[in-house]
Amino acid sequence: MTTMNEPEPPAVSDGTLLGLLVLDGVLVGALGLVFTPLYLGGVPAPLGVLLSVLVLPWLVFRAGEIDVRPSRAGAPLLAWVLTVGVLGLVGPGGDVMLPPTWQSLLLAVGGIGAGLWALRSVLNSAYRRNGG
């Protein structure tokens, strides 16, 4: 039993939360690949790009709240890049899920750019907090 002055211990450890954020990075990468070549009628609608650009920075920011070291804060981004690279270029059964189209380029550039922007923001805020 804790008193009013003692904070309650966390329900989940930081390592577990970071692992879940990395798993989310893998899932966002896989879903991004699946939804990127989507067409609505005859118009390309790269929803995978939108998903990656919106969710990936949030994952990096949450990882940065757990640990500001670049290897830890950028772990969801690294998981996303590896997932898109491996599944996109090798794919299940040898299929290429990342065809040479503008949607694929937009997925790669948008996801990496959004993730690096978030990582830079995390590192800059940590630098300012530490008196830099």
Image (cartoon, rainbow, N blue to C red):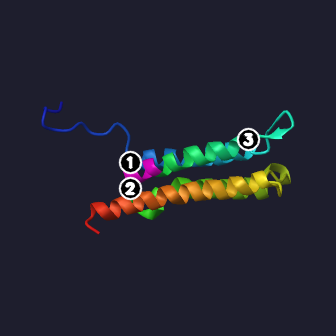
Q: At 62% from the left edge and 54% from the top edge, which residue is drawn?
A: 111
Q: CA distance from mark 1 to mark 2?
A: 8 Å
Residue 129 lies, in percent from the top left, at: 28, 60
* Contact check, label 3 and label 1, Cβ < 8 Å: no
Residue 102, quarter of the rendered image: bottom right
Q: Amino acid at mark 1?
A: Asp
Residue corresponding to mark 3: 35
Label 2 crowd bin: few (<14), some (14–19), many (20+), radius 10 Å: some
Q: Amino acid at mark 2?
A: Asp
Label 3 crowd bin: few (<14), some (14–19), many (20+), radius 10 Å: some
Q: Extreme bottom residue here?
A: 132
Rendered-image quadrant of the N terminus: top left
Label 1 crowd bin: few (<14), some (14–19), many (20+), radius 10 Å: some
Closest to the camera, between mark 3 and mark 1, is 3
Looking at the image, which is closer to me, 85 or 8? Answer: 85
Q: Amino acid at mark 3?
A: Phe
Residue 32, quarter of the rendered image: top right
Q: Main secondary structure of the magenta part?
A: helix
Residue corresponding to mark 2: 67
User: Which is more N-terminal, label 1 or label 3?
Assistant: 1
Q: Which mark is residue 73?
A: none
Looking at the image, which is closer to me, 60 or 95? Answer: 60
Closest to the camera, between mark 1 and mark 2, is 2
The magenta segment? 61-66
**Left or right relative to 14: residue 25:** right
Residue corresponding to mark 1: 14
User: Which is more N-terminal, label 2 or label 1?
Assistant: 1
